[in-house]
Image (spheres, grey):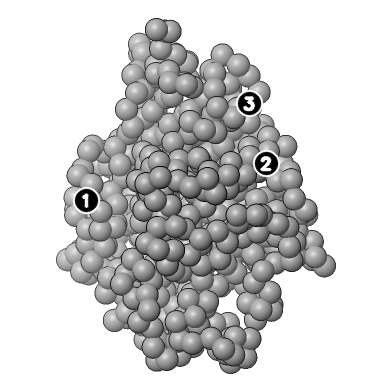
């Protein structure tokens, strides 16, 4: 058996283990955010003497989701590295931000196993960062958007250390899906993130931000629910982090009761999301890029065709939407002032179910993703746009081309538990072939900046349509794109 790999980082020596590639897990990139450091900006990690064993994942951050994960410790700000060979040099680097709904961030999920990408010659870094109240509650006495600050601290660690793992710090691609993609979009425009990465991959970008006024009121209501005297870090610091996460889960479930005051935010299920605070996040990515206040980059961005289907099926609402539901969704989510009428005119044969799914898919993921491609190109970057149309075989195909189906395809983790729910226990030859295609696009992009299909242009909205037989076509959701022409995702505000 070969010797287990060792690497000297700026904080000390770590020893991983060797599979088909070298794996290092649970490396701290910042101090545990507890005690006096709780709700603060990430503090630099401590140094250590001797060799630190890096073979187990770090503790999972407190999750504000109905998932049964027991508390495992407080050293949440850790990352993992999978590398073909720490003894080589100059390999491209992919930094994966596994954030979902700004409520969970579990780099240990088997769906993000780096094996296939590492075997293709990529150094893969997966990170944990604060989410929920720990990462995004808008508290009066600490920095906002602490989850983003954690991500920047992890990227700074990569710049300091990735060469020792065989990676090229000048060839870093930051990537994510859903709220992870929203994080990527934010990092594109944040001054403190400049120079920390070269390229970006964003799958299913959400337009999920709050104004300070709304964030302050929501956080105050949440703090009041907890019996805190004020929405401050000092008032919340002694509350157990996992109790705080559980309380946020319940709070999110009751958002509809606040629709009159909090408007569109109540449709997201995420009370505490990134805040356009003018400091950490100066403005939304779309306005920063189109206004030339941020420079474009090499960007691979896209979405699935049936983004909302996963949520409607899993919530038990699939097949039950009424005309009243469609009216409410269109009035709340379609662009104002005449978006609701525009949807009915563009989809005259659509029943309530299709209208609900279309406007939710558009407002939450499809249009923010498509408009990020446009904005990045307008800012001088190169955008490669895709849409996944391949239907998930599980549950008789009712999931369609649903949210997150693209992730196990890109990682090649078709045997992971989440993939099995979507694709089935035995992946079909179609699934394997499509996975290979998307994975090759990722590897090519992180290595060269080229996804191997035509880039987005204002006069030709060419898109790679991923399916059993993939093709490059004009953007498939043209009707929705035209409805949203001139409308960019705006922060949620008080009604």
Position of residue 426 in the picture relative to residue 470 (left or right): left
Of callouts 3 and 1, which one flags the residue occurring earlier in the amino acid sequence? Answer: 1
The image position of residue 375, as x and y in percent, is: 70, 62
> Is the residue 459 above or below the residue 77 in the image?
below
The residue depicted at 43 percent of the width and 18 percent of the height is 18
Position of residue 83 in the picture relative to residue 47 (left or right): right
The image position of residue 40, as x and y in percent, is: 37, 47
The residue depicted at 59 percent of the width and 90 percent of the height is 348
SS of the residue at dot 2? Answer: helix
Camera-side residue: 55 or 488? 55
> Is the residue 480 above or below the residue 134 in the image?
below
Q: Residues within 10 Å of mark 2 (few under 14, many from 20)?
A: many
| Disc 3: which residue | 91
Farthest residue to the front: give it.
429
The residue depicted at 38 percent of the width and 83 percent of the height is 321
Report how far apart the C-alphas of labels 2 and 3 lie in the structure: 13 Å
Position of residue 207 in the picture relative to residue 478 (left or right): left
Report how far apart the C-alphas of labels 2 and 1 lie in the structure: 36 Å
| Disc 1: which residue | 68
SS of the residue at dot 3? Answer: strand
Position of residue 259 in the picture relative to residue 482 (left or right): left
Of callouts 2 and 3, which one flags the residue occurring earlier in the amino acid sequence? Answer: 3
The image position of residue 240, as x and y in percent, is: 19, 50
SS of the residue at dot 1? Answer: loop
Q: Residues within 10 Å of mark 1 (few under 14, many from 20)?
A: few
Quarter of the image with the C terminus is bottom left
> Is the residue 446 above or below the residue 182 in the image?
above
> Is the residue 222 above or below the residue 392 in the image?
below
Report how far apart the C-alphas of labels 3 and 1 lie in the structure: 37 Å
Instruction: Say if residue 40 shows up in the picture.
Output: no
| Disc 2: which residue | 445
Of callouts 2 and 1, which one flags the residue occurring earlier in the amino acid sequence? Answer: 1
């Amino acid at each position: 058996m070969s010797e287990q790999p060792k690497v000297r980082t700026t904080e000390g020596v770590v020893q991983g283990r060797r599979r088909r590639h070298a794996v290092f897990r649970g490396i701290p990139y910042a101090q545990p955010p507890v005690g006096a450091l709780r709700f603060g900006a990430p503090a630099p990690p401590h140094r250590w003497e001797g060799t630190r064993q890096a073979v187990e994942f770090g503790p999972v951050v407190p999750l504000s989701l109905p998932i049964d994960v027991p508390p495992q410790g407080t050293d949440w700000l850790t990352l993992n590295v999978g590398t073909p060979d720490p003894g080589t040099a100059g390999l491209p680097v992919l930094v994966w931000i596994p954030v979902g709904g700004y409520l969970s961030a579990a780099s240990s999920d088997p769906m993000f196993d780096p094996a296939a990408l590492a075997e293709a010659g990529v150094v893969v870094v997966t990170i944990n960062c604060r989410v929920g109240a720990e990462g995004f509650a808008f508290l009066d006495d600490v920095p906002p958007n602490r989850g983003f600050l954690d991500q920047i601290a992890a990227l700074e660690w990569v710049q300091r250390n990735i060469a020792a793992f065989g990676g090229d710090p000048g060839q870093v691609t930051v990537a994510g899906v859903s709220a992870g993609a929203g994080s990527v979009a934010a990092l594109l425009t944040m001054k403190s993130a400049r120079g920390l990465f070269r390229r970006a991959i964003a799958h299913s970008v959400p337009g999920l931000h709050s104004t300070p006024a709304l964030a302050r009121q929501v956080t105050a209501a949440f703090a009041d629910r907890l019996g805190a005297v004020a929405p401050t870090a000092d008032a919340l610091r002694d509350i157990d982090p996992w109790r705080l996460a559980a309380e946020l889960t319940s709070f999110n479930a009751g958002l509809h009761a606040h629709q009159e005051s909090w408007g569109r935010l109540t449709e997201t299920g995420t009370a505490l999301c990134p805040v356009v605070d003018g400091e950490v996040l100066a403005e939304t990515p779309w306005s920063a890029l189109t206004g030339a206040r941020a420079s474009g980059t090499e960007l691979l961005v896209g979405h699935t065709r049936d983004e909302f289907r996963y949520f409607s099926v899993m919530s038990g609402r699939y097949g039950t939407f009424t005309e009243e539901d469609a009216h409410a969704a269109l009035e709340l989510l379609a662009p104002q002032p005449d978006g609701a009428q525009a949807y009915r005119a563009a989809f005259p044969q659509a029943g309530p179910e299709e209208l609900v799914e279309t406007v939710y898919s558009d407002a939450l993921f499809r249009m923010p993703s498509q408009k990020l491609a446009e904005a990045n190109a307008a800012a001088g970057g190169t955008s490669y746009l895709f849409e996944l149309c391949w239907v998930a075989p599980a549950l008789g195909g009712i999931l369609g081309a649903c949210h997150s189906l693209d992730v196990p395809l890109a990682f090649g983790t078709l045997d992971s538990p989440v993939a099995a729910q979507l694709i089935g226990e035995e992946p079909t030859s179609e699934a394997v072939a499509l996975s290979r295609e998307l994975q090759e696009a990722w590897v090519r992009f992180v290595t060269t900046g080229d996804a191997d299909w035509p880039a987005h242009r204002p006069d030709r909205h060419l898109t790679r349509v991923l399916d059993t037989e993939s093709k490059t076509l004009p953007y498939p959701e043209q009707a929705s794109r035209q409805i949203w022409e001139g409308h960019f995702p705006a922060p949620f505000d008080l009604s």
